[in-house]
Image (tube, rainbow, N blue to C red):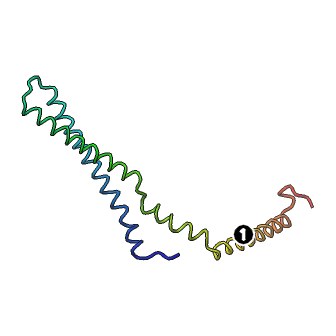
Amino acid sequence: MTISPLEIYFISLVDKIGAISEVAIFLGCIATAAFLFFWLVGKAESYKSEEDEKTLKRLWRCLKFASIGLICSVLINTFVPSSKTIAAMYLIPAIVNNEHIQNSTSNALKMLEELTKEWLEDFIKKEPKKNGIHT
């Protein structure tokens, strides 16, 4: 399994997409709060004219648009993985499915087991009475 330079480039772009969505969330929160505030103030006014009704309708449309943008940004920020996650998705299967690595770990495990047995035998032979072992 080889990874092309184009794939590496796209993996590096994922973090930028996350940063852009964070900025969009911040701006969306500000816009939604501002439009909601102005819409509520306009609704609370006791006098109503036809001009005020048009303004309230425009504010309501802007509030809906800002809310939809905010929700989309939150979803993008939530479901787009980081570059580390994508790199792990590429590398872990390549490492797990590599026969050379699997063979070397089994050989290393056998060697470690043999060395541990030798170390314990030497340890028991050198100091049997200190360790409570009587032979």
Residue 127: x and y, percent?
Answer: 84, 63
Which residue occupies the extreme right position in the image?
135
Few, some or many residues within 10 Å of mark 1 (<14, 14–19, 20+): few
Instruction: Identify whether 128 is placed above or below 68.
Output: below
In depth, the one of 96 and 57 nearer the eye is: 57
Residue that mark 1 sits on: 109
Left-right relation of 25 to 9 = left
| Count of numbered labels shown in the rendering | 1
Which residue occupies the extreme front position in the image?
50
Q: Quadrant of residue 130?
A: bottom right
Q: Secondary structure at mark 1?
A: helix
In depth, the one of 69 and 37 nearer the eye is: 69
Which residue occupies the extreme top position in the image?
46
Q: Report the residue at 72% width, 74% height from top.
A: 107
Q: Identify which amino acid the numbered label 1 is placed on.
A: Leu
The C terminus - image quarter: bottom right
Q: Quadrant of residue 102?
A: bottom right
Left-right relation of 127 to 52 = right
Residue 95: x and y, percent?
Answer: 58, 70
Residue 112: x and y, percent?
Answer: 73, 69
Q: Report the residue at 52% width, 68% height from top.
A: 91
In depth, the one of 99 and 66 nearer the eye is: 66
Instruction: Identify whether 41 is placed above or below 125.
Output: above
Q: Quadrant of residue 128?
A: bottom right
Q: Report the residue at 19% width, 42% height from top.
A: 62
Left-right relation of 132 to 108 = right
Residue 44: x and y, percent?
Answer: 16, 26
